[in-house]
Amino acid sequence: MVKAIYLDINLCCGCGACVVACMDQNDIFPEKGQPAYRRIYTMEEGQFPNTSFLYVSAACLHCADSPCIMGCPTGAITKDRQTKAVIVNGDLCIGCHSCALACPFGVPRYDLEEKMQKCDLCSERVEAGLQPACVRVCPTGALQFKSINKVLGEKEFKFVGNIVSGVHKVTNRR
Amino acid sequence: MKDVQRLLKKKIPTPETGIEIRKSICTICDPRTQCGLDLYIKDGKIIKVEGSEENPYSKGTLCSKGAATRQYVYNEDRLKTPLKRTGPRGAGKFEQISWNEALETIAAGFNDIKNECGPESVAFYSGYAKYFRPYLKRLAHSFGSPNYISESSVCYQATALSQKLVFGRPGGPDLANTNCLLVWSSNPFYTNPGDARAILKGKERGMKLIVVDPRETPTTAHADIHLQVRPGTDGALALSMAYVIINEKLYDQDFTSNHTYGFEEYKEYVQLFTPEKGEELTGAPADKIRAAARMYASFKPAAILPSASSVVHHTNGVQNYRAIFSLVGLTGNYDIIGGNYVKTPSFLHRAAFIRTREHEFVQPKSWDDMPPRIGADRFPVWVDVIDEEGQAMQLPYHIRSGEPYPIKAVIGFGLNYRMWPDSKGMLDSLNKLDFFVNVDIFMTETCKYADIVLPTCTSVELSELRCYDLGYIIYTQPAIPPLYDSRPAADIIYGLANKLGLDDSLFKAGYEAGIDWILEPSGITLTELKKHPSGMFTPKPQQLPEKKYLKTGFKTPSGKMEFKSKIIEKYEGRPGFEALPVYKPPKFSKEAAPELAKEYPFILNTGSRLPMFIHTRTYRLTWTSSLRPNFPSVDINSEDALRLGIKQDDVIRISTPKDAIEVKANLTQMIQPGIIHMYHGHPNADVNLLFEGDYFDPLSGYPGFKAALCKVEKVSER
Amino acid sequence: MLTGRKKIAIIGNGCASAECLKALRESGYSGEIHIFTDSKWPIYNPMLTTYYVAGKITFDQLFPYGKDLLYKKYRAHVHPASPVVTLDHEEKIVVNEDGLELKYNQCLIASGGSPFLPPIEGIESNRVYTMRKVDDAFRLREALLEKPEKALVIGASMIGIKMVELFYQQGMEVCLADLAGHIFPLAAHPECAQVIENRLIKKGIKLRFGAALEKVEETARGVKASFKNSNESEEADLLVICIGVRANTDFIDQKQVEVKQGILIDEQMRTNVPGLYAAGDVAQGKNTLSGERQIIGLWANARYQGRTAGRNMAGVDETFPGNIPHNITHFMGMDFVGIGDVNNYDKMEKKFDGKMFIQFFWKNGFLIGTNFIDTYTEAGVIKNALINSLINNNPVYSHSLPIVQNMLIKKILTEVK
Ligand SMILES: Cc1cc2nc3c(=O)[nH]c(=O)nc-3n(C[C@H](O)[C@H](O)[C@H](O)COP(=O)(O)OP(=O)(O)OC[C@H]3O[C@@H](n4cnc5c(N)ncnc54)[C@H](O)[C@@H]3O)c2cc1C
Ligand code: SF4
């Protein structure tokens, strides 16, 4: 059963716990120029008193047909057969930034050695029966790790092309 | 990569990787959360943290601050050994000394002052941290000083004071059972995730949600009605809601006629606050005020979730809160399940439904046997109502004036002078002390001014007792030993009690014996608690009936719920001491100071929570601070910014008649035009410099941190 | 002649071919697949040649699909080191230089392109280099062993700038010349180009624009280039030409197969001849921006086209709606991004804070192109949204997009406000 991280934007409050948990899990230290895998985006619209806003916690969506894999000139990016995670092999990455132009979600970032860095879906944790660190920490239950089929079955969710995870409800909150 | 290495890299706890999980709690933020921690330990070091699933409050989750525990514990600013100042105050020049020398120097200094001026001249202060407070307070009193004071003087106490004036005993919102929740200026999504989860659950079962907040927040996003008021106008809103509830006969007539004092006068006073008037005073539309009042009064049971401090950080805070809590009585929602339900605290303000001897422990001497506490002269209502402590906000005045007696020494456990309004004035006052000791985890700015600095440690390095309102209790065990030569705060207190030569058998018995003594009436022992490293449910929780006042009456002078305060009545005539919850706009507001507002047209609101910071505690962590790049920055409404030619991250100057600071601008639509919001305590842009030390609520002594007037100018482009 | 079972011929072994091969097998095609290539090497990536020359990657890393794993895994017969010389699409026969003939059922032309060399005097000098093939990389690597001190790069293109970077990092003196008036003449707006040029000049790169190469002479030092209407010639140890790529179509009968700059294809990668497909740098697919057909010489584009061809050849009905020109080049400590059309706009927005440079180009209310310097984070979002907007005739910022995209687009669009 392939599982994916998905976000219920109605529950995401932009607190950033997932971002920090991810940094703790993956030993990412911003002061050393290491980029975060997960980020919080905020969108505000309208003017007082009629404003609406949204928070979205986002990381790599592990696209079903990943544009970054197609854009990578070296074969450094691959899809794990079992977990369907999109994985970067740092040894092969040449830091050309091609994936940055390929990814529709602004995911790829590069460390000081110009190696692309992004979410690996915590595959080892998942194999060990644990949840990805971001899902595990989420205080509102906005991030969930669910079977893809289950998510696909929830018709209230609209799909982002053929992206398997990170499915978002496309309604504004207010 | 080899398998084990892969597992190690991803920190999977297995026998092969040798990674072990130990339990503790997080107290980085310390209201009533205490989320459970699973600490992944490898070779004696924490390599990762996670929430403990066993913890009934946090249920395995953490917030951004708790998730950053590892950076908090292993921070490079950690104090490593006791230090003695060698250079001038503030220079940061210290020499290492031994614990023995440190404690003996402190004890000798305190005893000298005691002999010369009396024990009251030594003040014992607790910063934001909570776990050691019972021991610190006992230390102060055992020593003979009434001056145990704390950060609560600018946090929860005024909220408690307001509730106590109205009901005698505060009643917290029964989130699990309420059908209508009125959240008053609180955003639990950023401060208390458990409450946020309860709100989400409530929404699922159809609970109505009304939120009063000047800002848009994740909480307001879930609200059925969001009353977006101007800061400091909460009282007017509450009175206006009361107008609707009374005039539409939606109130609980049985309760008001049988259990209240001053209802008729209150009812009459409320007539001034038509919803239209309410709109004028607060900015919330009259229709929404009506709708909110009807909703709150008709969905039963209804509860009010107050914030610890945002409503009372106003020059009219207590009166505003009294107006708000009056709604609870008015609608008959006091001390009922699903309403504002009264639970007796067991330990550290939390109710685990067990009987303890906490009060006896912390108050070994009666107030009457000691000289008056700090602030007693100026804040008589405080002394009448607040049992715990002195009013710490008055510390700088007391030091400077030496009246009614001198304060010569202060020992602070996490004292940060930037917490006070006119923070510069507070620092100057500290520098007037003969002897200043500060205990902290980190080498803070304030520590640099101390004569002796003692290193303490974080929650994961010590043992502490905590209760949870869910009838849960935990005695933690250190996941790692205290780092460097640091010691748990309680150890320091017990060590000091010993060196001071206090004749106090409970101090002599030791820390754990003291806790067993406190717990004795409950039948729970530490031996039992230690068998449950992640805590346990209390075996025989006390049953609490509803409406306990039917038997015991209200703990107020009239024995009833007081719309009109008999305590304040005693002082009537003093400005601000009105017995009814009279609404006055904040002292520095367009309404109260129109001339000033011409030059300083913006409302300055400080300290409203951001999700990644709690006071100054996580500023130094790169994980949390990366969530808000370019901090310190001030939130300004995008339209205002456009008008003033200010763009994102431009440097702007915020000035009040007192002072000015320069800080980056953060443009947002989540706040109202005309208001700027700035988080407090940052060394590079300390907004408390902008407040006069006497800009406070005359009833509580609370600074008006959440509504003053200021001016905004652009300084430079980013 | 090889006849018999169902056969598919693939001409060329670039990434377009590789993706076609994979797609055929993954879509269930079980007949024979024959790959013809003029090269003796496995599938390599032309873009990696400069990285190899610079010593940033190993030789093996030139081959992103592995050495011959792919052929084995997907059961392909490879006919290496012999170019296809004839393609008789009526008889459906391919013939290579070695004389091998194959009768096919379907054929994909994916022979890519070759560097264009202008027909001028002296161009055949062995001091003149190009950069595309493995052998090009070998040649230049060898030349660098002699510790040359100065290089002249003709062609201020994406490849040109990578050559400049390579020589610069070797500590060499570099002159970059182009007939055009500024760097990246196709992808960058003059104002954006100016910013890049200033940075290059600061790093000591000599720039010569409006310089049309006229003649190449060998000298004692190496080589001397002279330019039209200029007395100032440029002498260097070596000269690299990267002024463009020409589709490899020599073996095609252009009377039957429609060829302009490349082979014209439709959205299913079909040529005008039944059973004959083309993909990659040899093919002219749809530019969704102009609506015309154009060679878009990009790695990912070649792969998508190859894959689409393969799927269609295997009977899966799939379209690849087209592409727009887009480039990201990370060189000498900076990032340049050029997307879409930066010339035919009616409104331009710009922001430059000394480091980050952002330009948006609009036409009839539609975003048609962007230039970025030193901000790559939203590049992919904008590119995908732009393509999406063109295909669906929506504004680039629209609520029909996934939320994350929407947020990022809004963020970057408001940057210039
Ligand atoms: C230096 C350089 C840098 C580049 N940088 C980038 C970049 O940053 N981003 C990007 O997206 N793209 C870049 N490209 C372009 C990219 O490499 C090409 O678009 C892509 O490789 C095209 O793939 P293809 O399969 O169509 O053709 P090719 O890779 O050219 O493969 C065609 C193959 O066919 C063979 N062949 C040719 N004629 C015959 C024949 N008659 N018979 C048999 N075989 C034949 C060739 O030898 C070759 O092996 C760059 C190219 C170069 C040269
Ligand atoms: S989201 Fe971006 S990085 Fe992740 S798989 Fe998709 S294209 Fe690749």
Image (cartoon, rainbow, N blue to C red):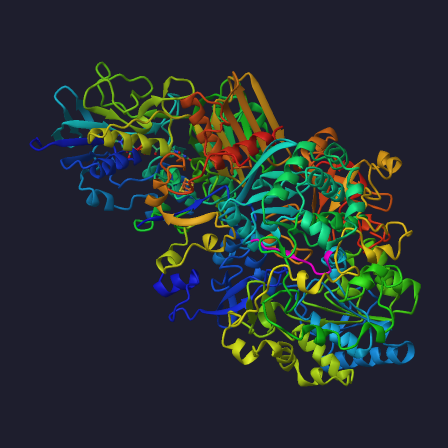
Seen at 14% across and 36% down, the residue is: C32
Residue B196 drawn at (x, y percent): 56, 50
Q: Residue furthest left?
A: C4
The picture quadrant for ligand 2 comes to: top left
Residue B602 drawn at (x, y percent): 78, 37
The relative height of residue B473 versus residue B291 in the rendered view (above or below) is below
The relative height of residue B88 versus residue C47 in the rendered view (above or below) is below
Q: Which residues are magenta?
A: B167-175
Residue B28 drawn at (x, y percent): 62, 61
User: Nearest the camera: C235 or C299?
Assistant: C299
User: Nearest the camera: C412 or B563?
Assistant: B563
Is B196 left or right of C152, judged from the image as shown? right
The relative height of residue B429 versus residue B658 in the rendered view (above or below) is below
Is C19 left or right of B337, judged from the image as shown? left
Instruction: Identify the image quadrant of the C terminus of chain B.
Output: top right
Magenta: predominant secondary structure element?
Answer: loop
